[in-house]
Image (cartoon, grey):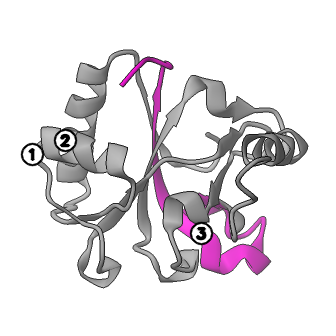
Amino acid sequence: MKNNANFFYCDKKDDLIKTLKALTKKLNANLIYCTENILQELLSNSNLKYNNTDYTICDAILSSCEYLIAHHGKIMLSSKQLGPHGIKNLPKEHIVIAYTSQIVKNLNEAMSGVNTRYINEGLPSTITTITSKNNSIENPQNEGNIKKLSVLLIEDFKH
């Protein structure tokens, strides 16, 4: 990613767990905000503490994403990952777990994918993109969505 985010590639679930443990230690993230069941299970298996109700007491947030947008180095998130909370209010340290199949070229591809994915259940109430802290000069109007990002990219495999 061009925006100085931490980026880790994991080809196996074991690598993902080891990397997540090491990263949370490096970030001093003792309590992680996480609302997604599959990621809560990953945190439990990694013996990492999480909270799924009160983000204000957490050091970081762990979420999946809708897409990684390669051309702009952005990450598309929706209310499916973030719940009802505005991105501006959530912890600045954001760890994203993404699959290689979620990489798209541009925003148009990402929006098309979201429209297709949620065709039967309705679009998420919020769709946003985030970028890392060092991108603030390029995009000052996006100030509230600037996060300290860490992306753990994994090969698609069954959970």
Secondary structure state at the residue bearing disc 3: strand
Secondary structure state at the residue bearing disc 1: loop
Mark earlier in primary sequence (2, 1):
2
Mark 3: give few (<14), some (14-19) or many (20+) Cα within 10 Å: many
Tell whether position 141 is magenta.
yes
Q: For the magenta stretch, what is the residue range?
A: 130-159
**Numbered disc in front, either 2 or 1:** 1
Q: Residue at x 75, y 59 (%)?
A: 123
Label placed on residue 146 = 3
**Numbered disc in front, either 1 or 3:** 1
Side (left or right) of 72 relative to 62: right
Label placed on residue 77 = none
Please name the residue that numbered disc 2 is placed on. Answer: 21
Q: CA distance from mark 1 to mark 3?
A: 29 Å
Q: CA distance from mark 2 to mark 1?
A: 8 Å
- Name the outermost residue toward the left: 47
Figure quadrant of the N terminus: top right
**Numbered disc in front, either 2 or 3:** 2
Give residue 11's position: percent from left, percent from top: 40, 15
Q: Residue at x 40, y 73 (%)?
A: 91
Side (left or right) of 103 relative to 92: right
Circles 2 and 1, Cβ within 8 Å, touching? The answer is yes
- Name the outermost residue toward the right: 108
Query: Residue 79's image quarter?
Result: bottom right
Q: Residue at x 27, y 50 (%)?
A: 40
Q: Amino acid at mark 3?
A: Ile
Q: Amino acid at mark 2?
A: Lys
Mark earlier in primary sequence (2, 3):
2
**In the image shown, does 59 or 133 lie closer to the viewer?**
59
Side (left or right) of 47 relative to 78: left
Q: Amino acid at mark 1?
A: Asn
Please name the residue that numbered disc 1 is placed on. Answer: 47
